[in-house]
Image (spheres, rainbow, N blue to C red):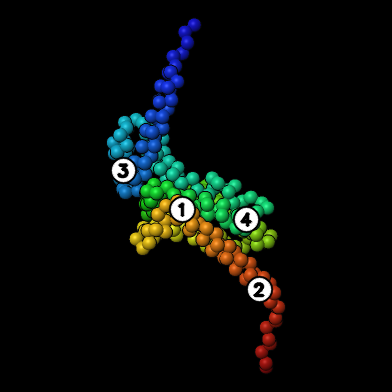
Amino acid sequence: MEKTPTLPADDARRTRSDGAQSRERLLLAAIRLFAEQGFARTSTREIALAAGTNIASISYYFGDKAGLYRAAFTEPSPGCESNLHAFTATGVTLRETLAGFYGVMMADLKRGDLARLSMRLWFREMLEPTGVWDEEIDNGIKPAHAALMMVLGRHLGLATPDDDLQRLAFSLVGLAVQLMVTRDVIDRINPLLLENDAAIDAWMARLVDYGEAMVNAELARRKAGAAQPITKPRKKKA
């Protein structure tokens, strides 16, 4: 009985490595071209040419153009929904919770040019929606937001969430999102603030400080409101 032919170990490893590199080149080329031109105006032939691979490799690795677009949109930035454990642990302090949360969000900024291209692709998707952004909201952002609401409610001692808790959660997220959205502005005004991993870590530490202050301010506001006596409206004189 003949044995099935197999590649030598070195050749097999090289083949797997070459395959991974081809897929990565396709993904990077797709992110850049989709961000610059949008989904409809970017052809698979153009992506394959930019990546230095044949067009059949797109079908092999991603199925089709839509599959490649979805991978370009989601893979470079796993998002909070993939790392909920980083900030939802019980028995930790508020600062530890916020450090875990902002650690996940700020990780994108450490991807350099890839982070910039990914953000531009997100902008492009919002301007020219294909449906992927709606999927991201439902499958990524909503679960992460719900997890953040849960841990904030726990730290504030709330039995049920309310609109003010929603406002607090969105505001905490906004502190980090602002850095991603206005990265070009920050770099133009003071490029040292986000120039390397150490600078990003320093800003993340400040976000923990700011976030803690916001949560404590909300807690104080709720306590002050609960302490105020309920007074009945005065009756108007006849």
Circle 1: element type: helix
Q: Residues within 10 Å of mark 2 (few under 14, many from 20)?
A: few
The picture places residue 36, in percent across and down from the top left corner, at: 32, 49
Q: Which quarter of the picture shows residue 63?
A: top left
The picture places residue 7, in percent across and down from the top left corner, at: 42, 18
Q: Label 4 sits on what residue type?
A: Val
The picture places residue 221, in percent across and down from the top left corner, at: 62, 71
Q: Nearer the viewer, residue 45 or 93?
A: 93
Q: Residues within 10 Å of mark 1 (few under 14, many from 20)?
A: few
In space, the residues marked 1 and 4 are separated at their CA atoms by 28 Å
In the image, is 174 to the left or to the right of 25? right
Q: Nearer the viewer, residue 159 or 175?
A: 175
Q: Which residue is mark 1?
A: 198
Circle 2: element type: helix
Q: Which mark is residue 42?
A: 3
Q: Which mark is nearer the camera, 3 or 2? A: 2
Q: Earlier in the sequence, mark 3 or mark 4?
A: 3
Q: Which mark is nearer the camera, 3 or 4? A: 4
Q: Residue at x 38, y 51 (%)?
A: 116
Q: Earlier in the sequence, mark 1 or mark 4?
A: 4
Badge 1 vs badge 4, beta-carbon distance below 8 Å: no
